[in-house]
Image (cartoon, helix red, strand yellow):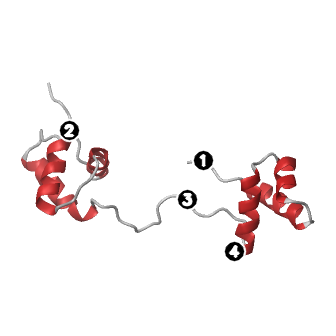
Amino acid sequence: MGKPYSLDLRERIFNYIAAGHSRRDAARVFGVSPSTAVRLAASHRDRGSIAPKPQGRAPGTAGKLVPHMDFLAEMVRTEPDITLQELAGALAETHDVSVVLSSIHRALVRSGLSYKKKA
């Protein structure tokens, strides 16, 4: 995900529009897309602020796998060489939850579980 434009640039674009220029003119002058200038003016109209909205997931929101982490951890502990495909199958069979394999992998890594081959 890209970074939001700086507050300084946002203020200059908004002040240019507020001075009576069109949004497309503001976009040309400041080197941004016309849709950016339109969204910036709409943001001020709707929210009263030109500051960028927060990016990413809101703190405290849980993913789909959070309630099932104990189950996944127990499966990995009892059978250390279980595959992600097998984990997904067990999760679907037991809890009727369908997830992408990479989601299971990320959840296991976040919880500190990983598979290391030993010589």
Compared to residue 119, the image places residue 57 above or below, namely below
Q: CA distance from mark 3 to mark 2?
A: 32 Å
Q: CA distance from mark 1 to mark 2?
A: 33 Å
How crowded pointer 2 is (Cα within 10 Å; few <14, some 14-19, many 20+) is rated as few
Amino acid under disc 3: Gln
Q: Residue furthest left?
A: 78
Which tag, 3 or 2, sits closer to the chain's start? 3
Closest to the camera, between mark 4 and mark 3, is: 4
Q: Are marks 2 and 4 in contact (CB under 8 Å)?
A: no
Amino acid under disc 1: Gly
Residue beneath disc 4 = 46
Closest to the camera, between mark 2 and mark 4, is: 4
Q: Could you say which is closer to the camera, residue 100 or residue 67?
A: 100
Where is residue 15? Give x, y as percent: 87, 64
Q: What mark, if any, has residue 19 been given in the picture?
A: none
Residue drawn at (39%, 67%) of the image: 61
Q: CA distance from mark 2 to mark 4?
A: 49 Å
Closest to the camera, between mark 4 and mark 1, is: 4
Residue beneath disc 2 = 115
Q: Are marks 3 and 2 in contact (CB under 8 Å)?
A: no
Residue 96 in which image quadrant: bottom left
Amino acid under disc 2: Tyr
Which tag, 2 or 4, sits closer to the chain's start? 4
Residue drawn at (60%, 47%) of the image: 2
How crowded pointer 3 is (Cα within 10 Å; few <14, some 14-19, many 20+) is rated as few
Is residue 101 shown left or right of residue 49? left
